Image (tube, grey):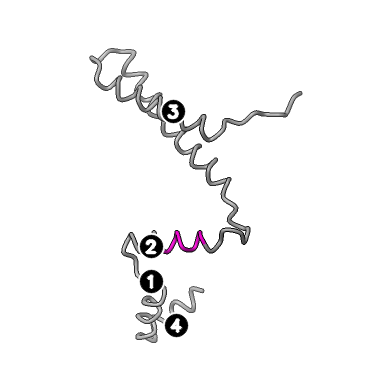
Amino acid sequence: MNTNIKWVTWDQAAITALLSFAVTIILHRLPTTKWRARIIPATTELSLISALYTLWRLAMKLSLDQPSGAIERARQLNRFQHWLHLPTELSLQQFVLQYDWLAQATNFYY
């Protein structure tokens, strides 16, 4: 028995996601028929699964446990946090330290 499985690459999955999404959009514009009502859920599901698989494969390429690139990833996260207008860690700490009960609760959590 051959156990050498060729996995779908991220770009193949991305193409599948885009094509199946395009087919879904086209099918939505066609007149309602029995076969169309059965195919739309399948193409929708295929595009969703393919997109999630693409993200999973791309995430596996990240070397999150390696020090190389850690500073750049930290900068990217900081920019993303700033873009979302999230509070900084320092501002959260300063807020928590104003209330003893909140500081104790967060210490208990950690």
Q: Which residue is mark 4?
A: 104
10 Å crowding of disc 4: few (<14), some (14-19), many (20+): few
20 to 63, vertically: above or below: above
First-in-chain label (1 vs 4): 1
- Left or right: 51 as drawn, with respect to 2: left
At a point 39% along the width and 59% down the height, the residue shown is 80
Disc 1 secondary structure class = loop
At a point 73% along the width and 29% down the height, the residue shown is 3
First-in-chain label (4 vs 3): 3
Q: Which residue is mark 3?
A: 46
- Residue type, numbered disc 4: Gln
10 Å crowding of disc 3: few (<14), some (14-19), many (20+): many
Q: Quadrant of residue 23?
A: top left
As rendered, which of 58 and 34 lies closer to the eye?
58
10 Å crowding of disc 1: few (<14), some (14-19), many (20+): few
- Residue type, numbered disc 1: Thr
- Residue 29 lies in the magenta stretch: no
**Where are the magenta residues, as a range?**
72-78
Magenta-drawn stretch, dominant element (helix, strand or loop): helix
Is there a contact, CB below 8 Å, between mark 1 and mark 2? yes
Q: Which residue is mark 1?
A: 88
At a point 30% along the width and 19% down the height, the residue shown is 27
